[in-house]
Amino acid sequence: MSGTSLDGVDAVVADFTPREGLCATLGAAHAPMPEFLRDELLELQAPCDDELARAARASLALADLYAESITDACRAAGIAASDLVAAGVHGQTVRHRPDEAWTAQLNDPARVAERAGVAVVADFRRRDMAAGGQGAPLVPAFHAALFGRPDRARAVLNVGGVANLTLLVPGEPVRGFDTGPGNSLLDLWFGRHGDGLFDAGGAWAASGRVDHALLSILLADPYFALRPPKSTGRDHFNAAWLDDALARHGGAFHPADVQATLTALTARAVADALGREAPGIAELLVCGGGAYNSTLLRALARDLKPCSVLPTSEWGVAVEHVEALAFAWLAREALAGRTTSLPSVTGARGPRVLGAIYPR
């Protein structure tokens, strides 16, 4: 998996035949996103010159990175790539426009299959969109299988570039949706003012103060008040969106205060959504890169009190592995011909088998 944060590729080798639980992680690997590729992918998030050729070249580079990550994860697991049943390879989302019934993930699954020597399952979103759905988020079905409990109402929050929630309430359909920005705006602002790609641990945000006037402007965006099903991405929450809000704010601000305010935005969007859609949730499990942002976790704990906020590692699943495990599971279900899209999440006309299969 390579997510909207564009920090790199996470690969896991998942065993779905453990004696306890849904799956076990046998090995894992992380490949940092090369700077040239990250810059190119960021530019491809918006209209630019020679898009088709540039997207094709980026797809080739991504495919090679995916194949390398699969090989490294197999090495970590002590197995050969030929031992794998398949690899679920989502691709890199560069545009997501459910309002126009299309989405774009850069990928070259045939090249991944050829380079890594594995069967590949890819193109997970478009079948759901063809059935009238949002095509996202895709992970709630896996969250339900991994973290659902018949006696406990809980939510799972994945904080990547975009933050998405899964609501697991006993006796009710699984629901899930994107709450809004996760790490993308935080990384963007830090990149303008800091040294590095992200605000490690939220330390810089912790040095600032929340600007409540700016926070009100940000939260006034109509997306936050939309009822699910809904999904979003960099098409909406991007540099232009943030710069427009800062211009409307009009006053002087300290850069660290903006970082603190963006952190508060992510937390408040989650808290408001939970209060509106599932007020009885008593436990929030957090995964994704944002789970390492202690300032964000403290903000979530304050805004959600008395709901407990815990990383998924407290339940035995590393926060950086959950999404990659989800796509291994989605690949497994596609090969078995089982449906994994949830109309209660995406709004599709019915459940569908997700994923196109590229044989070894």
Image (tube, rainbow, N blue to C red):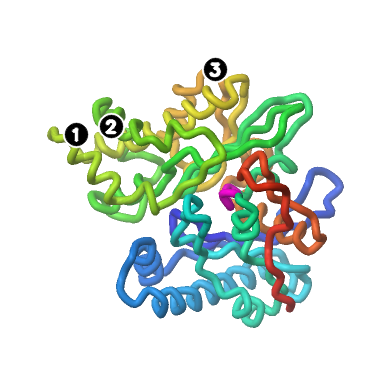
Q: What mark, if any, has residue 306 been given in the picture?
A: 3
Mark 3 or mark 1: whose residue is earlier in sequence? 1
51 shown above or below 164: below
Rounded to the nearest angstrom, the CA distance separating label 3 from label 1 is 32 Å
Q: State left or right for residue 201 relative to residue 85.
A: left
Q: Quadrant of the C terminus?
A: bottom right
Residue that appears at 36% across and 69% down: 40
Q: What mark, if any, has residue 249 been given in the picture?
A: 1
Residue that appears at 36% across and 62% down: 42
Q: Secondary structure at mark 2?
A: helix
Q: Amino acid at mark 3?
A: Pro
Rounded to the nearest angstrom, the CA distance separating label 3 from label 2 is 27 Å
Q: What mark, if any, has residue 176 been given in the picture?
A: none
Q: In the current view of this chain or complex, which residue is farthest to the bottom?
A: 114
- Label 2, on which residue? 217
Residue that appears at 67% across and 43% down: 343
Range shown magenta: 133-137
Crowding at mark 3 (Cα within 10 Å: few <14, some 14-19, many 20+)? few
Asked whether disc 2 touches disc 1, contact meaning CB atoms under 8 Å apart, the reply is yes
Q: Secondary structure at mark 3?
A: loop
Mark 2 or mark 1: whose residue is earlier in sequence? 2
Front in this rendered view, residue 74 or 59? 59
Between circles 3 and 1, the one closer to the viewer is: 1
Q: State left or right for residue 317 relative to residue 264.
A: right
Q: In the current view of this chain or complex, which residue is farthest to the top?
A: 306
Most common SS among magenta residues: loop
